[in-house]
Amino acid sequence: MLLAVNIGNSNIRFGVFVGKGEIVTWTLNTKPYRTEDECFAKFNSMYEPFGFSKEDFDEIVIGSVVPPLTSAVKNALERIHGCEPYLVDRETPSPVKHRSKQIGTDLYANAVAAHQLYSGHKIVIDFGTALTFIGIGPNGQSLGVSIGPGVDTSLRCLVDSTAQLHAIEFKKPKSVLGQDTESCMQSGFVNGYLSMIEGMIERINEEIGAKSTVIATGGLSGVFSPLTDKIDVQDQLHTLKGIVELYKFNKS
């Protein structure tokens, strides 16, 4: 069985592809960064609650945007399973062609999954530590990227920088203009980010001269996707699917 691992800035997501489209997935906090031995101890006991044993896995693929953790995770998993994990990154060959030597593995995987799963022009919005947009053309060409601060990242920065503002639940308030601190902040974050997201989709489509299929992924995609008709697909596992597509393309 294949174990896929996506090492992000906030979480490490594990996914087990058990066949017929079924995916079992769970996450662990990325921070604090762990040593190889700490990863070994943590990972060695993580399968049982999901009905797996470490002997079930004979293939492992890893995509990472956190270099300090990549080797620790890779080596720990190799010790546990006895097989060498396959690392994918922006240099891993695929049908998607990008022009940047700086594109992150997550963005590249998002583009690969979009190209493999959807037709025409695509935009993938990733609600992670950063809020990213990547455009993909019909033939798999990467059209470019936009990167801004993630929703939760912005909230933490605001709370840490002020004396009287606190963390909030991300939900749409009853009105744009709030009447108390919580509803005011909810409006600023939910309505503000919605306006940015919808505006960016319109600007990208205008720039490329086409209407794109818009896919949302990442931690808060499930919060924002139902609040707009500009997002066509919400898929929490889109990046993980892209990592697996890269693996399949190179191991076939």
Image: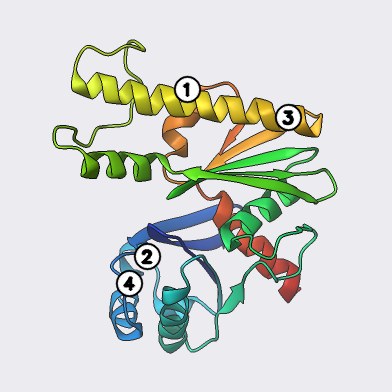
**Label pair 3/4, CB-CB below 8 angstroms:** no
Q: Which residue is mark 4?
A: 33
Mark linked to residue 227? 1
Q: Residues within 10 Å of mark 2 (few under 14, many from 20)?
A: few
Q: Tag 2: residue type?
A: Gly
Q: Which residue is mark 3?
A: 205
Vertical comparison of 42 with 104: above or below: below
Q: Position of residue 152 (x, y in %)?
A: 35, 42
Q: Which residue sits at x=31%, y=39%?
A: 155
Which residue matches tag 2? 51
**In the figure, is residue 30 to the left or right of 110?**
left
Image quadrant assignment for residue 184: top left
Q: CA distance from mark 3 to mark 1?
A: 20 Å
Mark 3, secondary structure of its residue: helix
Q: Secondary structure at mark 1?
A: helix
Label 3 or label 2, whichever comes before in sequence order: 2
The residue type indicated by label 1 comes to Leu
Rounded to the nearest angstrom, the CA distance separating label 2 from label 4 is 27 Å
